[in-house]
Image (cartoon, rainbow, N blue to C red):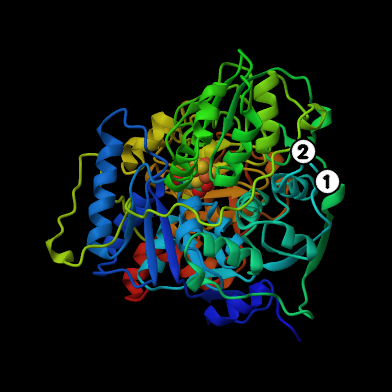
Amino acid sequence: MGKNLVQKIFESHLVSGTLETGGNIAISIDQTLTQDATGTMAYLQFEALGIPRVRTHLSVSYVDHNTLQTGFENADDHRFLQTFAAKYGIFFSKPGNGICHQIHLERFAKPGVTLLGSDSHTPNAGAMGMIAIGAGGLDVAIAMAGGPYHLKMPEVVLVKLRGRLGPWVSSKDIILELLRRLTVKGGVGRIFEFGGSGVRMLSVPERATIANLGAELGATTTIFPSDERTLEFLKAQERQKDWMPFEADSDASYDQIIEIDLGKLEPLIAQPPSPDKVVPITEVVGRQVRQVCIGSCNNSSYMDLMGVAKFLKGKKIHPDVSLTITPGSKQVFEMIARNGAMADLISAGARILESACGPCIGMGQSPPTGTISIRTMNRNFPGRSGTPDDQVYLASPYIASASALTGVITDPRILNIKPPRILMPRRFYIDDSMILAPSPNPEEVVIERGPNIKPLPTKGPLEDMIEGAVLLKVGDHITTDHILPAGARVLPLRSNIPAISKHLFERVDHDFFKKAIEQGGGFVIGGENYGQGSSREHAAIAPMFVGIKAIIVKSYARIHRSNLINFGILPLMFRDEKDYERIKQGDQLRIEGVRDRLQVNGSLTVQNVTKGWGFEVQHGLNQREIAILLAGGLLNYTRLNAKV
Ligand code: MIC
Ligand code: SF4
């Protein structure tokens, strides 16, 4: 029986388990990446493991999220990260060099290997024919220490593309179409493997747009084959030695097959407040636009920006629109600066930002109150832009450029313009001077720790009785942006858990932190897909810090559930969803005999002490996860077991 791409890589990296869908497996990790907002914690955790040098083939520490230096915090963190990387054998990408996923694709990704990254859009590198998974920082720390990554063997879904994209339709529309069909829950427990003749029509950066936004489906990851288009890209990056052909066997089998006829796709747009509120552009044309942001790890490649520059050349954007352009990397930035495209963008009225996450994570450029911002990005969760009542629409650079020109949401097909045709350059401009190699003399490197770097909070073993009030009850699709917001105000506190914890759930309940501290912790109740979105483990560490013992919901997003376990918080699920309705904020809950019950039983009984009734919750934890919880989290567990 032939094998698909996922089976091939998992088989060659399998450390334990068998590749049956739903089974517990562990895979070895070749490469890791971190970004600054999750990296400081990941490295503090790595340090706590007491290992002198990373044991991966390649580990890279990027700085791209916290680049706005409005106080000492971010700059201090950059120094910590740079010195830490030098000492422990990690490559360091300096602030200004660009967004982790864009750079990783350009300079490090290669077919057939595994990558674990402390950022949910790590699957971006799946465009290169590799397995790239987003995880919490602690999982990445363990991988840097040489430990495997544990997961449930996902279903593998073949997305078969045929035909070719029509004019003004882009690869963004392919993934928006999948989001339209499957929703933000549609990828949970699945890997999307792309195949079919239509794949050949897509360059590596176009594939990356798809793989990147696969995170919004909740998928474990997305993977493309490695073919001549991959070789074309690697050659242009002067990395042909990293290429190998990598295709699924012709008789490979899949858990499901989804077909997309590229010729039938039309330009799509995701409306607020979620990336799956996708409609054809024709349904929303004419709405007034005040801001357009082109960039993020989703659509900021050289070809994306050249397309925008060609489109805007010789034109002026609408007077009521503020247009920002964020090149994804120094390579992209430098190339469009050298070839004059940047001048076309500036002349059209664009505001050019440094190569970083920027507006995507609310690091500046918050849009005006209650107005529409069109972004080529991947998330439009409410308030993420920094404006509480923002109206963020997600679309391709074509739609973004057309709308910047007219001041209203515009279908580019109606403008009397020929779609710009951008070819892959034969050679990208290569200058890796902002990627620093680790020090050859690590013992001489002194790690710089500014006052923003606070020690890791710790937790004792799991208690046998868990008791407390329901501090908060929320609905479906609560994102990590609701749990612990990002943005220019909060992101600089990522290395300081006591300080960042004050912002816990502030978008949902302003008094949450106060309540949690006064009551010594308690429970949180939620609905479907709790914790979707980012990989930030702070959305688990801060709850641990304020004493949250258990979360009870209808279902979880993958990375967040792992993060809760890693930090010793019980991730429970209602057995009967009607109990969700019956429970009220403020009710006092109690679970007895937790330690014993966890080990012998798939369920626990929760007493609602206030109302005098009990209900069953399930946990779906495997033996390893139970052991981690009993130890009080993954760090304790790893130390106890003296192995990674
Ligand atoms: C995001 O896009 O939400 C982020 C910021 O990149 C996060 C990581 C973080 O919160 O640090 C992610 O996607 O994992
Ligand atoms: Fe950065 Fe946005 Fe990409 Fe997250 S989604 S890595 S914030 S650019």
Q: Secondary structure at mark 1?
A: loop
Whether residue 227 is visible: yes
Left/right of residue 468 with respect to residue 5 in the rendered view:
left
Q: Residue at x 83, y 29 (%)?
A: 283
Which numbered circle lies on residue 268?
A: 2
Whether ligand 2 has any atom under 8 Å from the Cβ at mark 1 is answered as: no
How many marks on residues? Answer: 2
Q: Which residue is mark 1?
A: 265
Amino acid on which disc 1 is placed? Leu
Q: CA distance from mark 2 to mark 1?
A: 8 Å
Q: Are marks 2 and 1 in contact (CB under 8 Å)?
A: yes
Say which of 558 and 11 sits in front. Answer: 11
Q: Residue furthest right?
A: 264
Q: Is residue 59 left or right of residue 573?
A: left
Q: Is any part of residue 470 visible from this angle?
A: no
x and y percent of residue 469 in the render? 51, 39
Name the residue type under label 2. Answer: Leu
Q: Residues within 10 Å of mark 2 (few under 14, many from 20)?
A: many
The picture quadrant where one finds residue 421 is top right
Disc 2, SS: strand
Q: Nearer the viewer, residue 456 or 522?
A: 456
Relative placement, left or right, of 624 versus 62 is right
Rendered position, 506 above or below 127: above
Circle number at residue 165: none
Q: Which residue is rendered at x = 55% and y = 29% of the image? A: 344
Q: Position of residue 587 (x, y in %)?
A: 57, 37
Seen from this angle, which residue lies furthest left? 444
The foreground one among 322 and 146 is: 322
